Image: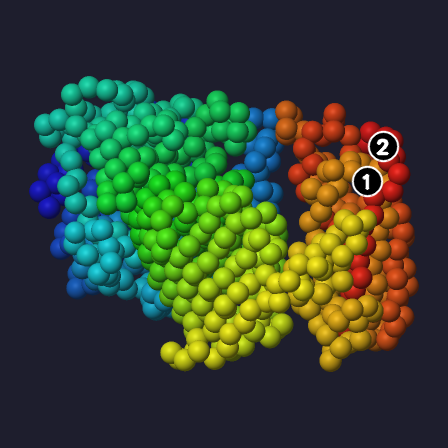
Amino acid sequence: MRSLVRRAAKVNEDRKERAEILATTKDAMSNPMYLLASLLLMLTMNFGPSLAAPFVSKGLFTYPAIPGIVPSGCFSARVRVHDDQAWRPLFTMETVGPAKTKSGIHSRGIYESVTGLSSSWCTFEMDVPVKVEITKLSPGDIETCVIRPISRQLTPVISNDKRSVSFQIEPRFAEKTTARSKQVPVNVAVEINGQTDEMITVFASPHLTDKPQPDDPGVVQVHPGTQPPVDGDWQTLYFMSGVHGLGKKAHPLRPGKQYYIPGDAWVDGSFGEGFRNRADEAKVFGLGVISGRKIGWYEVEQKTASKPIHLFGADTVLEGLTFIDSPYHTSMGGSKDPKRPTVFRNIKTHNWRTNTDGIHFFGSGIAEDCFIHGQDDSHYIAGSADMVRFRRMVYWRDDTFGVDMIFTAEGGQKTPGNSITEDCDSIYNKSTWGGIIIDQRGIGENRWIDGVGIRDFRIENPGRNKPIIKMYLPEYPCSFKNVLLKNISALTDNGHPLQITGGGPESIIENVTFEDIKLGDRWIEDFSPRNFTLAFVKNLKIIRDGKTVATYSSDIETDAGQIHPDPSNLLKNPGFEIAGFAWNGRQVGAAVVPPQEGRYACQPVDNFNSRNRVSQQVTKEVEKHGGGRYRLSAWMRIGSGKGVGKVALQFIQVNRQTGKQYVDAVTIDPVALTAGQWVQVAGELVLPWNPEKYDWLRSVHFQAQAQGRFKDLYIDSCRLEAQNEHKVRER
């Protein structure tokens, strides 16, 4: 409180300073929205509540506008204590998905699917009930409003003129938290008229403890336009109000030092010099912004620029900050000592570009109350760590790539039973590439994961193209066991069975418990093909209301013989005899359709952007044989109607020097299908690949698909054979 009062006492001085800055900020002044904001700012300096200075009263603290940052053109916001009639303006900022350019920092690493999408945000501190009002500045009335996560149970009230929406926020507390006060943030997304291309998020934070003051002993003031010191006898770097530029390379972090970025400061740049920058007891905190808007994705790839933050070491803390438009992985950290973990608390992100993962711990760490809006994987658990905890996380991904959580990276796990994620919400999962929420992939050879718990996980918008839970192991020896998935619910059922598939007899998933799992309006109570795709698993169990209702183990010896029944066929499980192993889709038997061969066939599960298709990745197999001639075939059957069948190889090739990609597909001539009969769709094609032009064969997929007006497609007995080598002409 001493900190808040001292800052509020400097109101008049801050007002004069803001006026001078506004008069000299040429770039910002060229923006019409900023001219309007500046006019309003000058008016409010003399008439009523002002954005020109911090405000503290009755447990509410708001920050002034950041000089040089244009306010949101889509929304404005204000807040007041519940029993007070005096509203306080909230400086509301905005980030927009960048457009791809021919050159410059946006020439690579851009998802065009999010270009032009807008996310606004505002932040404040509180420890009393408050009322927040959001006003829509863009055209159109407010007809509906949903505040997510729904589990926060915030009720929006739309104004009579349909231009504003208000809601009350109560202080929220938790027993499992590293915060001394036990109060935790309320970070929410306000969805208006069912649209997510123009959103606003409200970040209501507990009061930050141990805030420094600019004139405290051991504090060095860092003013905009100056570079902060790296070493010295100082204790805290205080980034003063305004926009700071640290350049392309990260500012080093030092053991025992503090780096404070308040809510009226914006830093363009990054902190921490990679994995080797160990800084025990370092703390980076505040409610300000760290932005990567001036760094290119390719610059990080080429190591001429840095990722937003690397914070490694015992008892390190990252707290409160909002990361905007990160160029690459956002926050990475970890401690070698599980008794002195790294703590990431109340971190928020609004990111648009490729590989903008959220939080990765490469060591022991605790992440809690973070809001991750990004375009790749939100966080890893059990990846090369002794102890990992994720609590009360919120996840949001747009129409791009990635999953909410991954069980592991290549490194596997160090300590059994010490990786737990709990009480989390997935509010948007719109990826047309995937849509997986919980994923296991990438475990290294002879590595293991033993003991992971995920519980109390709520999914509001499950992905459309993949199962919400996927556990997959490669063929080489590795182990994944003793996993508990408990109280996981999705508001809707996306139709994809959960995929639990080991990689073979030396790569088995075992001892997995599914307790009280709900998809839409139905509980998962058996291991039927509707619910699961299963292969190379042992001792799976379903619990409902405290009672075991189903168990399952694979016939591993029999399944092993079906991975490659014909060595000349490059496809795994070509006859779908091992459930959906290596395929997407649902295994069906004679009770549904007579298989073309063997005991089973496959029924595709429709994806949002690829109906009536099954596919299998064959990158490694094709890489061995190279570009040239291949023979492809698949048997297809439709229940009624008319259609044609096609088989193709879809590929992505990359020149890693230039970044140029070659994305295409080669397809055999379509074959007419006959209702009620199995028809072989077969032919030869040439796969173009010149390794001198594209040195990385990033992916190749075998695809079998039907088109037309029909019902009930089934596929069986697929083949991919390499023919004589063929000289491929450059394209």
The alpha-carbon separation of the residues under discs 2 and 1 comes to: 8 Å
Amino acid type, residue under disc 1 in the picture: Leu
Q: How many marks?
A: 2
Q: Identify which residue is drawn at 74% across, 70% down.
A: 600
Q: Position of residue 60 (x, y in %)?
A: 19, 52
Front in this rendered view, residue 112 or 696: 696
Which label belongs to residue 728?
2
Which element carries disc 2, helix, strand or loop?
A: loop
Q: Position of residue 719 (x, y in %)?
A: 81, 54
Q: Is residue 710 visible?
A: no
Which element carries disc 1, helix, strand or loop?
A: strand
Q: Is residue 340 above or below residue 167?
A: above
Pointer 1: residues within 10 angstroms few (<14), some, or many (20+)? many
Q: Position of residue 185 (x, y in %)?
A: 27, 55
Q: Is residue 82 visible?
A: yes
Amino acid type, residue under disc 2 in the picture: Val
Q: Is residue 122 above or below residue 489?
A: above
Sooner in the amino-acid sequence: mark 2 or mark 1:
1
Say which quadrant the C terminus sits in: top right
143 sits to left or right of 577: left
Which label belongs to residue 687?
1
Q: Position of residue 169 (x, y in %)?
A: 27, 62
Front in this rendered view, residue 599 or 34: 599
